[in-house]
Image (tube, coloured by chain):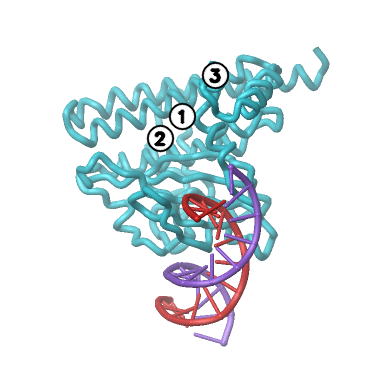
Chain colours: A cyan, B purple, C red
Amino acid sequence: MNILESSTHNGFQVVINEIEHQRALVTGLHDLIMPILGSCSGEAKLVQELFQDIFRSSSKVISFLELGDSSEKQTNIITKCKRNGGNNSLEGHIMLEEEAKEIGNKRRKNAQHIGSVVTQAPYFDGYQWRKYGQKWISKAKHCRSYYRCANSKGQGCLATKTVQQKETDGSGKVRLFNVDYYGQHICKKDRIIHPYVFETAHQSVPIGNHNQSSSPMFTNNDAHGIQDESFENIFMVPGIPEYLTDFADIEMVRALEITSMKSPLIPEDLWA
DNA sequence: CAGATTTGACCTGT
DNA sequence: ACAGGTCAAATCTG
């Protein structure tokens, strides 16, 4: 193993350890929240689903990283899937949902799918965005909005995202949005510092506590891009405690943080 | 008035 | 032909 391979492997191990640590933290949070919500409420089901999503996602990342430098294997799987064109063969079934999505992608520009997030707060991801289009998608209940990085003009940043409200369970209490990210940000110094949770030995800092005073993230939506929907409509979800709406946002921010950490060796599909 | 958003038209891939 | 992504003129807003 040469130095480069060794350092890459060590880097992966650090990431794996961090993700394992995050899983432990999330488990603790889960155990804390679920008794408060009860087991039958719609919010509890939603929160349960979000936790499951987080675990599925982290398991996926860990199992990928544990394959080590076998990124070739992953590439082969994807290639095979693409060759099969989504037919009914066994290999076709191996195809991940995200990969299938990528194949069916009709984007002409910025076709690089960076990742997807389901969140209650689709506009708060640390970047500023400008809406450039909106479209009713066939058979979808809600229209899809198209955003590009606010620095697309000034710095030529090609990052875009689409936001589409998910169809809910019908209760209408909670609005979830699918957010798909395309293209890497190449713009500089425009990011808002993430409200990371830094854990100390025996004391966890509450979510949202960091940078809250210096960052407008939790106090002023004007500084965060999109204003075509009201702040209240997005954040003040009836029946959901404030710390839970914060959690949903932290989840998204973390997903993005992982995205920004990714190795060029890892296929984009993994991060979807 | 400048910059952001909206919206219908246009373009492209399937 | 159709669905979905982008463009650009019109409109809105601070």
* Amino acid type assigned to the residue bearing label 2 in the image: Val
**In the rendered structure, which disc, 1 or 2, sits on the residue that comes first in sequence?**
1
Q: Find disc 3 in the rendering and name its residue.
A: A89
Q: Is residue A44 above or below residue A124?
A: above
Residue A35 image position (x, y, % from top left): 21, 25
Q: Is residue C4 left or right of residue A44?
A: right
Q: Which mark is residue A199?
A: 1
- SS state under label 3: loop
Residue A169 image position (x, y, % from top left): 25, 39
Instruction: Please tell me whether mark 2 or mark 3 is closer to you in this view.
Output: 3
Q: Is residue A91 above or below residue A239?
A: above
Q: How busy is the neighbourhood of tag 3: few (under 14 within 10 Å), some, or many (20 plus)?
A: few
Residue A5 image position (x, y, % from top left): 77, 19
Residue under the point 28% across and 42% down: A168
Residue B2 placement: quadrant: bottom right
Q: Disc 3 sits on a residue from what chain?
A: A
User: Do tags 2 and 3 sit on the same chain?
Assistant: yes
Q: Which mark is residue A205?
A: 2
Inter-mark Cα distance, 1 to 2: 6 Å
Q: Assign the C terminus of chain A to one quadrant of the image.
A: top right
- SS state under label 1: loop
